[in-house]
Image (tube, rainbow, N blue to C red):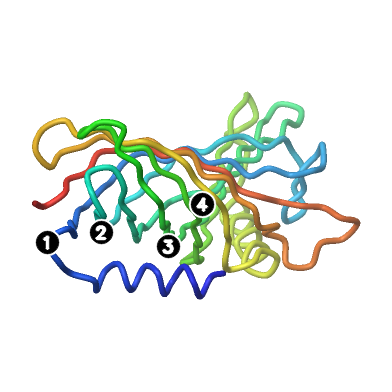
Amino acid sequence: MKKILLASAIALFTGLNAQTTFGVKAGYALSKLNSNENDFEMGGIEGGLKSKSGFYIGGLVEHKFNNKFAIQGEVEYANLGGKAEVSMPGITVTEKMNLNRIVIPVSARYYATPELGIYAGPYVSFKTSNKVKFEMSGPNAGMADPSGIREGERYVERYLNDTLKSTDFGLFLGADYAIYKGLFVDARYSFGLTNMIKNPVDGETLKMNFFQLGVGYKFK
């Protein structure tokens, strides 16, 4: 399936004719890691999972078959991931896990009106880097050793690299609306289908969902 998606994206980018349009897009991403366990543990830290804000930027190519139907391929760089929050006496540790990815979505599009496009399709993503940031809050936050914090961040980064898969697959759906000429606004939600844990024990799963809201421009 991943090879089919890549081949489709390449074909879209190389299939030039009068019905093909290129564009760029960027915006806000809100992502969350979802575990089937009540308490999430990553790198020795247990806590509740929360959403994390990030961003995305990329390019697209759309091929229209007629005024109603089209297919679109994209390549995006996205700052995704999630947060784990751990509370201890006098201090709360927020562990931000930045799972930076190259995301390749391919969608079938339907134009309900000339301005409003509705679409859905599969995506595949590839790891570029995993970065972790610890944030401390509470009355005892100032007592934390900065060198110890950084060592903890590096430890969890190594754990993520060793434990999580480098590719991810899922489905997405969304809509965009043309504002003026080639300028448009876009919103979508992506559902991760891959268990991101390489070697799960006792059936634990970790999947990532993310919402994107942004603007773009199609060159016509």
Q: Amino acid at mark 4?
A: Asn
Question: Foreground: 170 or 14?
Answer: 14
Whether tag 4 and tag 3 are in contact, CB under 8 A, the answer is no
As helix, strand or loop, the secondary structure at mark 4 comes to strand
Badge 1: how crowded within 10 Å, few (<14), some, or many (20+)? few
As helix, strand or loop, the secondary structure at mark 1 comes to loop
Whether tag 1 and tag 2 are in contact, CB under 8 A, the answer is no
Instruction: Name the residue rendered at 41%, 52% in the picture.
Output: 107
Name the residue beneath numbered marker 1: 18
Whether tag 1 and tag 3 are in contact, CB under 8 A, the answer is no
Instruction: Name the residue rendered at 15%, 39% in the picture.
Output: 183
Q: Which of the numbered marks, if any, corresponds to residue 98?
A: 4
Task: Measure the alpha-carbon separation of dots 3 and 2.
Answer: 16 Å
Instruction: Name the residue rendered at 36%, 36% in the picture.
Output: 175
Q: Amino acid at mark 1?
A: Ala
User: Residue 170 falls in which quadrant of the image?
Assistant: bottom right
Instruction: Tell which circle, 4 or 2, labels the residue nearer the N-terminal end.
Output: 2
Q: Amino acid at mark 2?
A: Val
Instruction: Tell which circle, 1 or 4, labels the residue nearer the N-terminal end.
Output: 1
Task: Measure the alpha-carbon separation of dots 4 and 3.
Answer: 13 Å
As helix, strand or loop, the secondary structure at mark 2 comes to strand
Instruction: Tell which circle, 1 or 3, labels the residue nearer the N-terminal end.
Output: 1
Q: Which of the numbered marks, if any, corresponds to residue 61?
A: 2
Viewer-nearest of discs 4 and 2: 2
Q: Amino acid at mark 3?
A: Ile
Whether tag 1 and tag 4 are in contact, CB under 8 A, the answer is no
As helix, strand or loop, the secondary structure at mark 3 comes to strand
Task: Measure the alpha-carbon separation of dots 4 and 2.
Answer: 27 Å
